[in-house]
Amino acid sequence: MDTVALILAGGQGTRLGILTENIAKPAVPFGGKYRIIDFTLSNCVNSGFYTVGVLTQYRPHVLINHIGIGRPWDLDRKDGGLTILPPFLGRKESDWYSGTANAVYQNIGYVDQYDPHYVLILSGDHIYSMDYNELLEYHISKRAQGTVACMEVPIQEASRFGIMVTDADGRIVEFQEKPKEPKSNLASLGIYVFDWPFLKEVLIQDEEDPNSTHDFGRDIITKLVKDERVKLYAFRFDGYWKDVGTLESYWESNLELARPLPPLNLYDPNWRFYTHSEEMPPAYIGPEASVIGSLVSEGAEVYGVVENSVLFQGVIVEKGAVVRNSVIMTHVKVGQDAHVENAIICERAVIGEGAKIGIGPDAPSKLDPRVYTGRIAVVGFDAAVPSGAFIGKNAVVGNSVTSEDFKSLEIEPGGFVLHNSEEA
C-alpha cells in the first residue's frame, strides 16, 4: 500500500447543541439522505484510496452502525478496506485519545502493517468534495515531508481558522492559530498528507513532550513550521469545503443544496457521494401539495406546502401543513395544519396538528447563547411537539421531549423545553 487514509471521526461537535448530544458530529444527518462522514469516505474511494482507518471516540455507536464494514463505499475488502479504530482499552492514565495527534500515534501499528510511503490525515466532520490525488501529487512535486490543504477565506473571517503564511514557492513559514490580526487569508482545512516515516518519528517525539496537547494544528504543525529543516507546504484548494460546526452553518449548508445551482453538486455522475441508508419507495407528492425549490428524498410524502427546504427520507408533511426554510430529518411527521419555518427538526420527531414553529420575532437563547445564536428553532431527536403548541424563533425542544414535558404550549423566542426538565 502506497497510501493509507486516516479519518479523524471522534469529534463531539458541541456547537451543534442537541444535534450532537447523543451522537458524534460525523454521524449527524446531512443533505436529505447522508451523514457528514459520507463525504470524506466518498472522497477517499473516488480518489482511489481503499485503505481507510476511521478513528472514533465520542458516542460512536450510531457512526459505527452507519459505516458497518464499508460496503456502500466499496470498502468491504480483504486487502485494505475500512477499519474502525477506537481508542485502545487498558492504556495507562486514560483509554481516550487525548488529541488528534495522539489518536494517530495510538494507531501507528495499524498504519505500519501496510508499510505505506504516505499517510492522509482527514477530518470526518466537514462537507466537501476533493480529489486527494491532486493533494498527493502536489506533495510529491514539492518533495515535501508534509503538506497542508488550505483555502483562501475572506480576511474578516480569517480569525476563525488556523492561518498559514507561505513564501512565493508555497512553503509554510508561519502558522497562526485563530489570530486576532491575521497575516494571511490562507486557512488550514485540517487535511494533511505526510511522508509516513517522517510523521511517525514526529508523533513519537510529540508523545514524549509533557507540554504538548497532542493536537495536529496546535502542536505538530506549529513545531514543524518552526523547524527550518522541515519542508512543509500549503496546497491551495479552490473547490467546495464547509465546516458545518455551528447550527447556523449546518442549516445554511443544507438549504444551499436546494438552490438551482448548488455550490456542492450531489448529482455529478463522475463524483458520486455514497451512503448507507434505508431502502424506501419513491417520494410521493399529493394532488393538492406544493413543493418549490426543495430537496425531497425517497419515502417522503407531501400533502401540504414545502418551500426552500430539505426533506430527508420518510418525512410526512400532512394536508394543510407548511414547511419553509427548514431541514426536516428522517421519519419526521409534520401534522395537519402545522407551520414550520426557519427550523431544524431532528430524526423521528413528531410535530402535532396546528403547531407553529420558528415564527415571530427573534430573541437570545436562554439555554446556551453561544450555541443557539438566532433565527433557527431546533426540535430534537424523538421529540414530540403537542398539537397547537407555539415554538418561537431560536427556541429549543430537546431530545426525547414528550407532551408531558411541556408546562405550557407556548415556548417563547429563545426559550426551551427539555426532557424531565422543570423549565419550559
Image (tube, grey):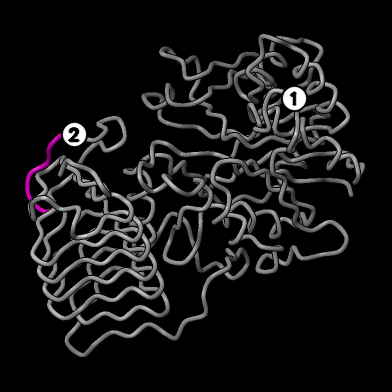
Give the x, y percent position of residue 54: 68, 48
Neighbours of disc 1 within 10 Å: few (<14), some (14-19), many (20+): few
Q: Secondary structure at mark 1?
A: loop
Q: Is residue 144 above or below residue 280?
A: above
- Comparing 173 with 61, the one in front is 61
421 displayed left or right of 35: left
Q: Quadrant of residue 106?
A: top right
Q: CA distance from mark 1 to mark 2?
A: 41 Å
Q: Is residue 13 above or below residue 213?
A: below
Q: Which mark is residue 366?
A: 2
36 displayed left or right of 389: right
Give the x, y percent position of residue 334: 23, 70
Q: Quadrant of residue 422?
A: top left
Q: Which mark is residue 92?
A: 1
Amino acid type indicated by mark 1: Lys
- Comparing 1 with 270, the one in front is 1
User: In terms of secondary structure, what is the magenta stretch mainly?
Assistant: loop
Numbered circles on residues, count? 2
400 displayed left or right of 223: left
Amino acid type indicated by mark 2: Lys
Mark nearer the viewer, 1 or 2:
1
**Most extreme residue toward the bottom, as rendered?**
287
**Which residue range is magenta in the image?**
359-364
Give the x, y percent position of residue 124: 59, 46
User: What's the residue at 78%, 57% (across, down)?
Assistant: 50
User: What's the residue at 71%, 63% (across, down)?
Assistant: 69
Residue 115 in magenta stretch: no
